[in-house]
Amino acid sequence: MIEFVAGLGLVLLVLSDNFRTILLPRPTVRALPLSPLLGRLFVPLWFKATERIKSTRLRQTTRASLAPLLIILALLFWVALLVFGYGLMIHADSKDIGPAADLAETVYLAGSAFITLGVGNSIVIGPARFLVVLAGLSGLASVTIGATFLLTVQQALHRREVLVLSTLPVAGRPPSGLVILETYGLNEAPDALAELFRDWEKWAADVLHSHRADPVLAHFRSTDEDGEWLAVFGAVLDAAALLLAATETQRPTAPVARMFLPIGCRTVGSLERLFAVQAAPTRDATVDREQFKVMRERLRSAGYSLCKPEDAAYIRFQQLREDYRPDLIALCRHLRILLQEPPLQGSQPEIARPKRKRTPTTQAEVKA
């Protein structure tokens, strides 16, 4: 009876964790979180190993393989515990199995039923038949659920990275909110800037939902180390804060930026609490007055009307930034994502101009 109850408890625990992780699309409270526990033990070791890699591309590629590896390990962990749990329950009813089978034989029988091979040499009668059939059904369900989960992860990752890749060219390397505002200002595109904030508002809500339900998504890396998804997200948040604090914003950009900041701050704070990391000190998110003065001058050169006085704008910018920047810094440090303040002195974005076709000059070019 003790062996049967232990096996049943193990099976129910794994199925419950499987249900809460894959089938329930929201964060839940778990008595014993098996898959997150596996990640907490494995992730720090992986990061320590990758920090020794000197090549930037190889280091980024190695870190990008962490999330798929975590998914595979979690699936294998679930399967192993389920097979062992069914093996315990079958062994508890070993009187209905012939010839006599020890625990290793019953685990093998449960495994063959789970993966639907049916190669066991034992003859099962009585109630033990029900356990063998139940193990087979669990195997079929696990394969189906696992395949669905992989498709869900790929779709969520695709939605996250498309906007990141489209924003990175206008944000610079490393991504900067100031460069974003300069790019749209020099190209006289306030409507496009408002559309950018609308897209990132939807992006933040999507990431808030998907990454809290499946925390493994946060470990999927972007293509480039200096253009990670959290760094680009932080740059867009900086752009909204700088726009509202330092410029005389007008419609349609100002209201959209004002609505984007709360959902952006909530997304960063929720992810920071999800991984149980402590927010960085406020001083790490501070921009000094000289830097802010340079930022204002660059915005003026880009065509923005600056608000006065400068001291009030500086205080407003610091207040807006403190709502998300300390949590963002702590989250990036935990995930080993490069987040740095770009230099304020340097080349500025150019005005986008359409490329003109060169007029053919030679006879061969004319014929072509």
Image (spheres, grey):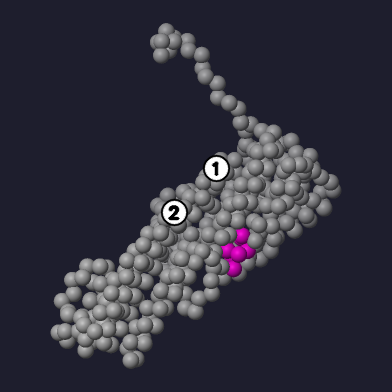
Residue 55 visible to the viewer = no
Q: Give the crowd class for mark 1: few <14, some 14-19, many >=20 residues within 10 Å.
A: few
Name the kind of residue labelled 1 in the image: Ser
Q: In the image, what residue occupies the spot 58% across and 63% down?
A: 271
- From the top left corner, tell me how far across and down residue 284 is, in percent: 65, 61
Q: Tally the numbered discs.
A: 2
Q: Quadrant of the C terminus?
A: top left
Q: Secondary structure at mark 2?
A: helix
Q: As displayed, is residue 125 above or below residue 174?
A: below
- From the top left corner, tell me how far across and down residue 111 is, in percent: 26, 73
- From the top left corner, tell me how far across and down residue 254 is, in percent: 74, 46
Name the kind of residue labelled 2 in the image: Gln
Per the model, the C-alpha gap separating discs 1 and 2 is 18 Å
Residue 268 lies in the magenta stretch = yes
Q: As displayed, is residue 170 above or below residue 244?
A: above
Q: In the image, what residue occupies the spot 33% across and 80% down?
A: 85
Q: Which residues are magenta?
A: 267-273
Q: Earlier in the sequence, mark 1 or mark 2?
A: 2
Mark 2, residue position: 154
Viewer-nearest residue: 344 or 116? 116
Farthest residue to the top: give it.
Answer: 363
Farthest residue to the right: give it.
Answer: 309
